[in-house]
Image: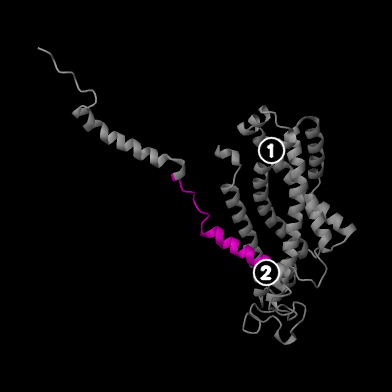
């Protein structure tokens, strides 16, 4: 009597009931773990509020002469130290000059100096840092020795000495601050280059026979620019505070050109009777520096070295 052959294609009833839920769980886990399903977190409300404020400051700096504000140099003798009102939205200073107009035109000085100084530091310092971090050896030793010598001088003292000899024009201050910021960007770019140069994609490019110029342009530079640019935004806030310090000491651009630091310096004598003369430019400077730090930190976290995503 022959025994019927087992049906190999039919699943065992017990096995089916046990494995079906597991298969479903595996499918759901795989779908949840798929890279395409991950959602990137947004920047958040704080980031966008800071960005809006920076855009407003930039518009004031670029289009100060076109905006519907009063002349920042014309005094209103009858309304000296006036509080904010319909005639003067942010009040007036000790000479009766409109605070809003001086705030708008003062943004031009802060933005010009900070952008110029950061651009010089990023381009020159970033180039030196990338070259030193990529080629290493004697070239790195020579370049970093020069950078360390510059860093050995007290920056503020050196700045004051240079301003005393060269002058206090807007261009001169921007160039001097930019020159003094080169060593900082050099060290940031060098440190980032050292980290990127050891990544797998750089080694693979070298193994495939790519020239140094191609490796620098295609692999190193794109991964160094973003961290240095994010640091540059934070450094812009430092430059704005530095310019305000110089203006407070009477060493910024020549009067009567309005600057935020100069407004604080002029208004400190009226603190008891008209504190808004000092508070308004101080708040404007505080919000600008805070916004630069928030945006810079957010971008640095969001757009870190691309190799970290590999």
Q: Which residue is mark 2?
A: 281
Q: Quadrant of the rendered structure where residue 117 is?
A: bottom right
View extreme (left): residue: 1
Residue stretch rendered in magenta on the structure: 37-60
Q: Does 51 appear in magenta? A: yes
View extreme (bottom): residue: 78
Q: Position of residue 100 (x, y in %)?
A: 68, 75
Q: Residue at x 71, y 67 (%)?
A: 61
> In what quadrant of the picture does the N terminus appear?
top left
Q: Position of residue 92 (x, y in %)?
A: 69, 79
Q: Does 200 appear in magenta? A: no
Q: How many labels sit on residues?
A: 2
Q: CA distance from mark 2 to mark 1?
A: 39 Å
Label 2 packing within 10 angstroms: few (<14), some (14-19), many (20+): many
Choose between 6 and 92: the one closer to the eye: 6
Choose between 46 and 1: the one closer to the eye: 1
Q: Quadrant of the rendered structure where residue 170 is?
A: bottom right
Choose between 155 and 288: the one closer to the eye: 288
């Amino acid at each position: 009597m022959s025994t019927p052959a087992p049906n190999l294609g039919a699943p065992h009833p017990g096995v089916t009931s046990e494995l079906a839920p597991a298969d479903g769980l595996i499918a759901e886990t795989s779908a949840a773990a798929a890279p395409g399903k991950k959602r990137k977190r947004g920047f958040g409300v704080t980031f966008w509020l800071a960005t809006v404020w920076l855009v407003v400051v930039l518009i004031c700096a670029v289009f100060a002469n076109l905006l519907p504000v009063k002349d920042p140099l014309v005094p209103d003798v009858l309304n000296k130290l006036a509080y904010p009102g319909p005639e003067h939205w942010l009040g007036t200073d000790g000479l009766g000059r409109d605070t809003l107009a001086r705030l708008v035109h003062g943004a031009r000085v802060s933005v010009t100096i900070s952008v110029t100084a950061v651009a010089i530091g990023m381009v020159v310092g970033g180039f030196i840092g990338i070259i030193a971090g990529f080629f290493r050896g004697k070239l790195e030793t020579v370049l970093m020795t020069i950078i360390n010598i510059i860093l050995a001088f007290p920056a503020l003292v050196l700045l004051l000495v240079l301003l005393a000899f060269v002058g206090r024009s807007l261009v001169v201050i921007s160039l001097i601050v930019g020159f003094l910021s080169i060593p900082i960007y050099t060290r940031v770019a060098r440190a980032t280059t050292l980290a990127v140069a050891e990544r797998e994609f750089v080694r693979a490019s070298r193994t495939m026979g790519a020239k140094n110029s191609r490796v620098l342009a295609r692999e190193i530079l794109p991964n160094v620019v973003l961290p240095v640019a994010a640091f540059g935004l934070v450094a812009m806030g430092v430059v704005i505070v530095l310019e305000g310090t110089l203006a407070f000491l009477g060493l910024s651009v020549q009067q009567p050109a309005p600057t935020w630091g100069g407004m604080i310096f002029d208004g400190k004598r009226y603190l008891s009777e008209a504190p808004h003369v000092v508070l308004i430019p101080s708040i404007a400077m505080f919000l600008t520096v805070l916004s630069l730090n928030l945006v810079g930190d957010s971008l640095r976290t969001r757009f870190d070295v691309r190799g970290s995503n590999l």
